[in-house]
Amino acid sequence: MTNEPSYVEGDATEPLTRGEFNDAMQSVGRSFESVVSDVNDVKSELGELRQHVDDRFDQVMQHFDAVTTRMQDDIVSSMKQVLSDHEQRIRNLER
């Protein structure tokens, strides 16, 4: 934003001249263009941030899937071992 006054100096009861009106409209236009530029910059930054968050979330989910798969494998393996141990004890008791 520029340091231009946000009003037209002079007596408020006097009508604006065509030049004053044009100057004021140009100032409004520049301010609007600056706001649009700032909004576009923010949208761009948000898009980049969203992509980063999406990428990171995908990495976390892949790690989570790997961990849960390993845990499931460990649980199945442990249960098979317990079952095998119990079967062996039963066979020993039957003898």
Image (cartoon, helix red, strand yellow):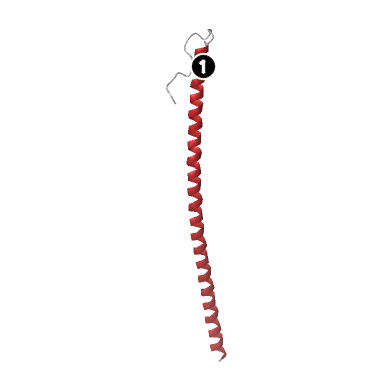
Establish if 65 lies above or below 13: below
Nearest the eye: 1 or 66:
1
Residue 61, image x and y in percent? 51, 57
Q: Quadrant of the N terminus?
A: top left
| Residue at point 48%, 29% (across, down) | 34
Residue 68, image x and y in percent? 52, 64
Q: How many marks?
A: 1
Nearest the eye: 46 or 27:
27
Residue 73, image x and y in percent? 52, 70
* CA neighbours of label 1 inside 10 A, class few (<14), some (14 to 19), many (20+): few
Q: Residue furthest left?
A: 3
Disc 1 is placed on an element classified as helix
Hey, what amino acid is under mark 1? Asn
Q: Quadrant of the C terminus?
A: bottom right
| Residue at point 52%, 15% (across, down) | 21
Residue 81, image x and y in percent? 52, 78
| Residue at point 51%, 50% (across, down) | 54
Instruction: Write down the residue under mark 1.
Output: 22
| Residue at point 50%, 20% (across, down) | 26
